[in-house]
Amino acid sequence: MTTNATQVGWLQEIKASISLGSPLILTNLAQIALLTTNVIYIGHLGKEQLASATLAGGMYQACMIFSLGLLSAIIPMLATTLGKDRNNKQAIRTIIHHGFYTALLVCLPFWLLLWNSESILLMLGQTPEAAAMAGHYMHNLQWALLPYLFYLVLRSLLAAYERPLWTLLIATLAILLNALLGWLLIFGHLGLPALGIAGAGISSVLSSLFMFIGMLVVAHKHPEFSFLQLRAHRWTFQPALQWEILKLGFPIAITFTLETMVFYAAIIMMGLIGSTSLAAHAITMQICTITYMFPLGFGQVATIRVGLANGRADPRAAVRAGWASYLLGVSCMGVTAMLMWGMPEQLIRFFININAPENRAVIITATHFIFFAALFQLTDGAQAVAAGMLRGLYDTRTPMLLALIGYWLIGVPIGAWLAFGLDMEGVGIWIGLVCGLTVVAILMTLRWYRYSRRLLEREYVR
């Protein structure tokens, strides 16, 4: 009877995880499709434009990922609060309000940093032409950050309530809007001026603004969220709660940034090798970014489901929720790895004209990169979900240190040594990425395994 009950519990958890994870993954894919659409459009302008946009986009994404990590603190806080008392509307409202404060707080210094992206890229050894083009793109793209962060705050609320379908709908509409605006502004259709990569930045800003406004409408009109009082004139500010968000979110942000900056360091090193390697890396990274949305979604599921169980003081359910998400996330990445090994050129053709003779070197180089990218699919998925599982238990500092060890003490040095010391160039950089991600995945998984064992032992003692 106990075995049957256990099996039923696992099946119910997997079903619940898929039910919550599917729209979250689709929403993540929809959001990444905004940048992917721009990459596809810019790729048709030429490899120099694609390389410059990659430099700017990588810097913007690093700032965005740090901000996303900081705001990720409100998800376990919301989930734990709901697990304890779903009717505690005041606590939920206060967390959301302080999520908006956090978004504004982190955005202001990043705007200043991004405005000076051309000078930063010059200091990093990029060519004046590439840095100037990237800076021109950034001066439009950077204004998408704040509305996107505001959108993330409201997305966290719907995810914690396990109501992600509205978020998916808005993100899908934003894709269509961004595709239309990019087509009009980048290439100058229907009588509009052809703005090139600057047009891609403008379309991103307008699409992000649309996403935030759409979520505002849902929060205002949906009866379940009317308690938020987003239009109220007086919002309270609680320094203790703001500090709690920052204290929990800062290690998450550092962890996200350590991983993101590894890939941006790879972009910088690829730029030093040449525009062909940089363009090939941009294509490969865009493919990996798309596949990463699957474990990222199940990592979000793990944070929510583990947090809800933790709030109910149910350690067995928390452990089961974590491992169910882990299994689903890693399984998805196994499928993507097989696709990347089996059809690399079919994937590349989405981003560049494979029939153009001038692109042949980029295609060959990207094919080599994709082989190694497929190698780390499983480990990338494992570390992403494991980090989400640990966040559900408010464990954020140790994962930050594990990311530092794996990415920066192992991955980057190995990649740089192979690329420049042994003249393996871009392939060496990708081997370094594989090594770093594998180490982080193993360490994160062991951390969760030990944590979950302690939870179950405490329940048994009780």
Image (cartoon, rainbow, N blue to C red):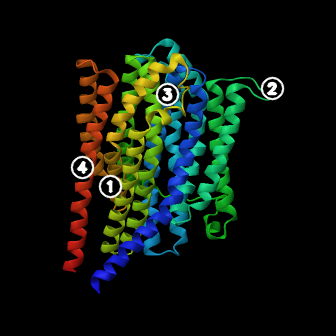
The crowd level at tag 4 (other Cα within 10 Å; few <14, some 14-19, many 20+) is some
CA separation, marks 2 and 4? 55 Å
Please identify the residue farthest to the right as the structure is shown. Answer: 191
Q: Which label sits on residue 442?
A: 4
Rendered location of residue 351, percent (x, y): 54, 31
Q: Which of marks 4 and 1 is nearer the N terminus?
A: 1
Residue at 54% across / 58% down in the picture?
23
Amino acid on which disc 3 is placed: Thr
CA separation, marks 4 and 1? 10 Å
Q: Earlier in the sequence, mark 3 or mark 2?
A: 3
The crowd level at tag 2 (other Cα within 10 Å; few <14, some 14-19, many 20+) is few
CA separation, marks 3 and 4? 30 Å
Rendered location of residue 64, percent (x, y): 49, 40
State whether residue 269 is above or below residue 11: above
Quadrant where the image shows the C terminus:
bottom left
Q: In this view, does 202 lie to the left or right of 355?
A: right
Q: What element carries label 2?
A: loop
Amino acid on which disc 2 is placed: Gly
Q: Which label sits on residue 197?
A: none
Q: Which label sits on residue 191?
A: 2
Identify the residue under disc 3.
54
Quadrant where the image shows the N terminus:
bottom left
Amino acid on which disc 4 is placed: Ile
Q: Which of marks 2 and 1 is nearer the N terminus?
A: 2
The crowd level at tag 1 (other Cα within 10 Å; few <14, some 14-19, many 20+) is many
State whether residue 250 is above or below residue 112: below
Residue 93 falls in which quadrant of the image? bottom right
In depth, the one of 191 and 225 nearer the eye is: 191
Pointer 2 with pointer 4, Cβ within 8 A:
no
Q: Is residue 177 left or right of residue 242?
A: right
